[in-house]
Image: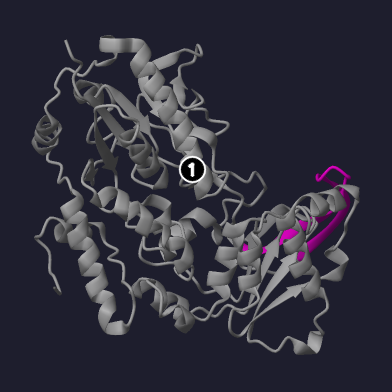
């Protein structure tokens, strides 16, 4: 007796979920894959986490689009796991579930004053300027001097978007509401603070070099912040990426002060650890940092020398953090679903049958998109091994009709958006951008996205 078609649900239609679906479809298994997405649009952080002035990175969507347009992976968007359905519901219709929900929250930064008005998480700001439908359409950009805490590409993105003149974003897909608010921003100086040295930052060479080419924005570094110990030299010699980053930063130290004539400035400070956000009447009025010293192993210790900086807004870009999912184990410290190479495990360390994870919710918010693909391969390899080892017992779904899940969601009042619905929204956004010479202009309100995707909203086509 032949086994039935394997039914697999993938929860989260960002790169991790799409890669996992694609790899699974090529395993040789007779498999039916449904890709669930909470938002009305797929592509996750590539759509909602990449700065609009980085179209090169956004081109990853082209490859992801090609995977989904094949038609062998069914997109079911606008379906919220935990609200519209839960694990027991999925088990009714699927033999296996892969969670690829990513990490969209800001990691905590436990310093006094973090709760003050004017203290923001970079993840929220990125979601705002990328037109994420879950965040408000406004943002309080009324500060002249701003601090950004962090030493990675997100910190650079936030600093660049804050300092960049809004008109220079017009060729991009920046939403109209974001452009208007950025246009009115009075910012003149953005201070980026990194607690370690130039050889320890996590900037990518290309992203750092791009910072030096933003029109009418000067990048200012401070020679006293440049310390290279034995560990720093080892890092420079062992990594071409580190070598390029250090060279770019060091070259900027050679600029003469009189050459800094731009109307806006990005200041990069190294060996400064934020220790307190200063406030008055509940509002940010400054930040206190402690000078640090390298230990020789890439880490730092405080020197006891403190400095106060006059800023009226602080953006913390210290990393992303995963969110717990209903009925799924969660590691509150690491911000991930506990797993063993993609197999989700319970509190006793036992694999939950048929439940898997991939992407940032599996390994934490580290690595580039290329790592996401290899990460998905590992998870799918174990899933395939479990199918083979489990035999007929692995095929546990009780309702195997592909239409059954749609009927279930319809009964719950869920407006499911399929691939054809996304194509409607995609065409609509491109139509909005065409008169302005732009690839697209994002639709921001969730309700409007749903109406357009279901063919009920206004259209310019």
Q: Quadrant of the N terminus?
A: top left
> What residue is shown with label 1?
372
- Taking depth in this image into account, of 110 and 226 the one nearest to the observer is 226
Horizontally, is 385 left or right of 194 in the view? Answer: left
Q: Quadrant of the C terminus?
A: bottom left
Q: Is residue 92 visible?
A: yes
Give the class, few, some or many, for how many residues have Cα within 10 Å of label 1's Cα (few <14, many ≥20): many
The percent coordinates of residue 35 (x first, y second) are: 27, 40
In the image, residue 53 sits, relative to residue 388, either above or below, namely below
The residue under the point 88% across, 59% down is 227
Stretch of the chain drawn in magenta:
284-308
Where, by quadrant of the figure, is residue 274 drawn?
bottom right
Residue at the image position 61 percent from the left and 72 percent from the top: 210
Image coordinates for residue 361, horizontal then vertical, percent:
47, 36
Q: How many marks?
A: 1
Residue 420 located left or right of residue 264: left
Q: Main secondary structure of the magenta part?
A: strand
- Say left or right for 289 vs 40: right
SS at mark 1 in the image: helix
Camera-side residue of 229 and 283: 229
The question of residue 288 being in magenta is answered with yes
x%, y% of residue 60?
42, 57
Query: In this picture, is 437 found above or below 15?
Result: below
| Nearer to us in this view, 429 or 310 | 429
Q: In the image, is residue 114 part of the stretch drawn in magenta?
A: no
Q: Is residue 344 above or below residue 438?
A: above
Residue 293 visible from this viewpoint: no
* x and y, in percent, of residue 350 in the image: 47, 12
Q: Residue at x 12, y 40 (%)?
A: 413
């Amino acid at each position: 007796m032949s086994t039935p078609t394997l039914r697999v649900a993938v929860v989260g239609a960002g790169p991790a979920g799409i890669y996992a679906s694609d790899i699974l479809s090529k395993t040789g298994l007779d498999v039916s894959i449904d890709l669930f997405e909470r938002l009305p649009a797929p592509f996750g952080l590539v759509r909602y986490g990449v700065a609009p002035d980085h179209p090169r990175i956004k081109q990853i969507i082209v490859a992801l689009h090609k995977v989904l347009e094949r038609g062998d992976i069914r997109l079911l968007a606008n379906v919220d796991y935990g609200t519209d359905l839960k694990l027991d519901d999925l088990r009714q219709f699927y033999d296996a579930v892969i969670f690829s929900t990513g990490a969209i929250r800001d990691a905590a930064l436990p310093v006094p004053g973090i709760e003050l008005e004017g203290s923001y998480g970079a993840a929220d700001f990125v979601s705002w300027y990328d037109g994420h439908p879950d965040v408000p359409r406004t943002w309080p950009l009324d500060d002249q001097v701003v601090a950004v805490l962090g030493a990675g590409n997100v910190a650079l993105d936030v600093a660049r978007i804050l300092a960049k003149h809004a008109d220079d974003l017009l060729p991009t897909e920046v939403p109209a509401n974001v452009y208007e608010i950025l246009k009115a921003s009075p910012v003149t100086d953005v201070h980026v603070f990194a607690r370690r040295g130039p050889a320890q930052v996590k900037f990518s060479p290309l992203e750092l070099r791009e910072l030096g080419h933003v029109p009418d924005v000067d990048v200012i570094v401070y020679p006293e912040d440049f310390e290279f110990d034995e560990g720093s030299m080892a890092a420079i010699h062992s990594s071409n990426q580190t070598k390029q980053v250090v060279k770019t930063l060091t070259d900027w130290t050679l600029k003469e002060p009189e050459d800094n004539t731009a109307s806006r400035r990005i200041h990069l400070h190294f060996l400064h650890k934020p220790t307190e956000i200063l406030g008055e009447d509940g509002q940010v009025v400054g930040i206190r940092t402690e000078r640090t010293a390298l230990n020789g192993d890439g880490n730092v210790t405080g020197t006891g020398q403190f400095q106060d900086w006059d800023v009226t807004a602080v953006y913390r870009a210290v990393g992303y953090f995963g969110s717990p999912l209903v009925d799924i184990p969660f590691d509150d410290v690491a911000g991930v679903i506990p797993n063993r190479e993609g197999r989700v495990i319970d509190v006793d360390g036992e694999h939950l049958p048929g439940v898997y994870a991939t992407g940032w919710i599996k390994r934490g918010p580290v690595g580039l998109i290329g790592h996401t693909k290899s990460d998905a391969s590992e998870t799918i390899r174990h899933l395939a091994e479990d199918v083979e080892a489990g035999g007929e017992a692995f095929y546990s779904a009780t309702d195997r009709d592909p239409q059954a899940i749609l009927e279930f969601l319809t009964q719950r009042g869920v407006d499911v958006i399929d691939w054809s619905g996304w194509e409607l929204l995609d065409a609509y956004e491109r139509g909005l951008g065409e008169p302005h010479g732009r690839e697209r202009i994002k639709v921001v309100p969730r309700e409007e996205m749903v109406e357009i995707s279901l063919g009920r909203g206004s259209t310019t086509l």
